[in-house]
Image (cartoon, rainbow, N blue to C red):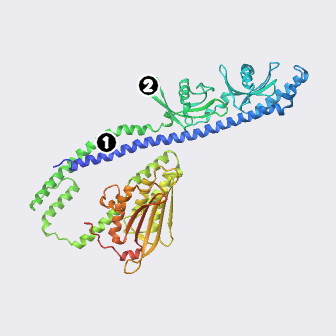
């Protein structure tokens, strides 16, 4: 016996083909889950970061406007230019300026200090909410550089970075006149808000880094993490980056890096989130992937041992008995095996050999029964991948705690299953079929939010006409699978139904017309030519099984009174047109197509 054609070989191949998709599904599910977690965590934290940066930049811009207006609106600062240095009026004006600065520090919540510098007398007035001596030292050291930058140039809105020993700041200086300069000082730590970021864990955090990659603010990140982030500053234009850090033991630790460059200074806001904390529940799936090949091998070997004893050995005995019968030995009797199922088969075989010469078959009744069985079997060919994908989507939505979407998905899926239980009927009403399609497309809309829509253009007077179940769904499913590719605009499926008259028969009759169109990529020319030539009917087990199923059921039921056409629309997208007799349930019960001769 040819081993390749044997049941044992087919069982091994079949079980392998079953386990391989499961392995691929688990692997893809793990990758997809990681991507979903990254997208959601990055979106949440990027929103927090953008809001914080926007608030900081707004305060800095408002401070710029405040400093630029001092020379025009503050009478005390204007009067200092005309008062004698050290006079009583001069000191009183400085005191009023000091009080005003202290009041304004409370208004501009990020500002640490305001100062006014007299370049002629080398006199510095400083109002600060922190350590006076440290701030005074920083301003005095930075003033020569600030004044040099303002010489002969238009004043720019950018803030300069001033580095101290243990304290860094942003400083903004404006020239009021030839003698006086005003400015503001911002503590870098006041611009950094690490507490607002989720999933940062013990090893994550936020930091502000300069153009040279050095840290400008305090941070929970260590120096190696800051250096790692600085090496990827150029990628801040991406929504997020996945970067790796090599630990001391040689393993790699991955981080999710987010960042926004500042528009007011040469610095960048950076957030590092450890993936180990974000993906704390996903290693379970990774363990399954590693153990799946071993489990598949154990299952295969165990199944082969059991099947050898319970199935293959009794099957060999049965095959030998059939060969003897084929040679004319009708007195063959087989011993009854231990399995109840095979006992029934053996008993039937023994009974067949004793009654085979007296068996008569009514050809006409057998033909009707064969046609009816074929029709029902064709109706029950439903692609199980849709159910698996829907359950996978429900699992993913539940993992993300989107309970409302889970409820919607489960509701549509329940209605979908409820219809499938009725799909064994000979015919169903058109409105029932369209309700079933609506549930299917609503589920697909939940899978592809804001990317998929559909239109049902069916008159209210057509819902009572009947058609074979699941006539429309294969074409809607094919449209989503093949036409929904590389799209930037929403994918729209349109289902229309109308009634027309035909005069080809001896007396006029009504025809139910159905069309399924989309705005997708359409049929490839080679495939369209094959479909128009009816080559889908030559391979009922191939890639056009859904099309073959529909047309075969229509031919079995209506004969030449039903048809199917394919085309591409001029404006883009595929179009499928179906026509069949327009019959109600009562009319359908009185009219059946003659059996179709399929050779």
Give the residue at mark 1: 296
Please indicate whether residue 376 sits to the left or right of residue 245 in the image: left
Give the residue at mark 2: 250
Binning the other alpha carbons within 10 Å of mark 1 as few (below 14), some (14 to 19) or many (20 upward) gives some
Does residue 470 appear in the picture of this structure? no
Asked if marks 1 and 2 touch (Cβ < 8 Å), the reply is no
Indicate the quadrant containing the C terminus: top left, top right, bottom left or bottom right.
bottom left
Element marked by disc 2? loop
Q: Residue furthest front?
A: 152
Position of 220 relative to 38 (above/below): above
Does residue 39 appear in the picture of this structure? yes
Q: CA distance from mark 1 to mark 2?
A: 32 Å
Please indicate whether residue 219 sits to the left or right of residue 326 in the image: right
Q: Residue furthest right?
A: 88
The first of marks 1 and 2 along the sequence is 2
Q: Position of residue 103 (x, y in %)?
A: 80, 31
Q: Give whichever of 224, 359 is nearer the camera.
A: 224
Please indicate whether residue 170 sits to the left or right of residue 198 in the image: right
């Amino acid at each position: 016996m040819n081993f390749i054609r044997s049941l044992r070989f087919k069982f091994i191949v079949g079980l392998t083909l079953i386990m391989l998709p499961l392995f691929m599904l688990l692997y893809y599910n793990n990758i997809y889950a990681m991507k979903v977690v990254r997208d959601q965590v990055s979106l949440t934290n990027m929103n927090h970061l953008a809001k914080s940066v926007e608030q900081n930049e707004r305060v800095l811009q408002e401070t710029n406007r405040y400093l630029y207006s001092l020379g025009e609106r503050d009478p005390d600062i204007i009067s200092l230019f005309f008062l004698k240095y050290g006079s009583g009026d001069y000191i009183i004006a400085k005191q009023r300026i000091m009080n005003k600065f202290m009041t304004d520090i409370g208004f501009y919540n990020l500002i640490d200090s305001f100062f006014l510098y007299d370049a002629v007398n080398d006199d510095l007035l400083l109002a600060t909410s922190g350590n006076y001596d440290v701030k005074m030292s920083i301003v005095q050291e930075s003033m020569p550089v600030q004044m040099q930058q303002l010489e002969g140039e238009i004043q720019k809105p950018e803030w300069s970075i001033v580095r101290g020993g243990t304290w860094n700041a942003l400083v903004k200086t404006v020239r009021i006149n030839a003698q006086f300069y005003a400015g503001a000082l911002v503590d870098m730590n006041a611009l950094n808000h690490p507490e607002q970021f989720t999933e940062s864990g013990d090893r994550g955090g936020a930091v502000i880094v300069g153009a040279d990659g050095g840290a400008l603010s305090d941070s929970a990140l260590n120096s190696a993490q800051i250096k790692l982030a600085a090496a990827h500053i150029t990628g801040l234009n991406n929504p997020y980056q996945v970067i790796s850090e090599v630990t001391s033991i040689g393993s790699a630790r991955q981080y999710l890096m987010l960042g926004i460059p500042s528009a007011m200074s040469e610095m960048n806001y950076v957030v590092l989130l450890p993936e180990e904390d974000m993906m704390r529940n996903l290693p379970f799936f990774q363990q399954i992937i590693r153990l799946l090949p071993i489990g598949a091998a154990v299952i295969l070997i165990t199944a082969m041992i059991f099947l050898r004893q319970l199935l293959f050995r009794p099957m060999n005995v049965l095959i030998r008995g059939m060969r003897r019968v084929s040679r004319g030995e009708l007195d063959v009797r087989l011993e009854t095996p231990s399995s109840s199922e095979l006992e029934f088969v053996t008993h039937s075989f023994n009974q067949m050999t004793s009654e085979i010469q007296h068996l008569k078959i009514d050809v006409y009744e057998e033909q009707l029964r064969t046609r009816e069985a074929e029709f029902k079997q064709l109706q029950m060919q439903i692609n199980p991948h849709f159910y698996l994908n829907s359950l996978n989507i429900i699992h993913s939505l539940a993992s993300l705690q989107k309970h409302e979407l889970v409820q919607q998905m489960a509701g549509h899926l329940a209605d979908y299953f409820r219809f499938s239980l009725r799909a064994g009927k000979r015919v169903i009403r058109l409105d029932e079929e369209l309700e079933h399609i609506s549930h299917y497309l609503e589920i697909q809309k939940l899978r592809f939010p804001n990317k998929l829509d559909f239109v049902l253009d069916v008159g209210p007077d057509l819902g009572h006409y009947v058609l074979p179940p699941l006539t429309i769904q294969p074409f809607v499913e094919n449209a989503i699978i093949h036409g929904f590719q590389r799209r930037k605009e929403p994918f729209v499926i349109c289902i229309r139904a109308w009634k027309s008259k035909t005069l080809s028969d001896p007396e006029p009759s009504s025809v139910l017309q159905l069309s399924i169109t989309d705005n997708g990529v359409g049929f490839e020319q080679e495939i369209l030519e094959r479909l128009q030539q009816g080559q889908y009917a030559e391979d009922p087990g191939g890639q056009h099984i859904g099309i073959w199923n529909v047309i075969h059921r229509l031919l079995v039921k209506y004969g030449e009174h039903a048809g199917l056409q394919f085309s591409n629309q001029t404006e883009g997208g595929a179009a499928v047109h179906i026509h069949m007799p327009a019959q109600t349930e009562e009319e359908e019960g009185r009219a059946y197509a003659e059996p179709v001769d399929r050779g």
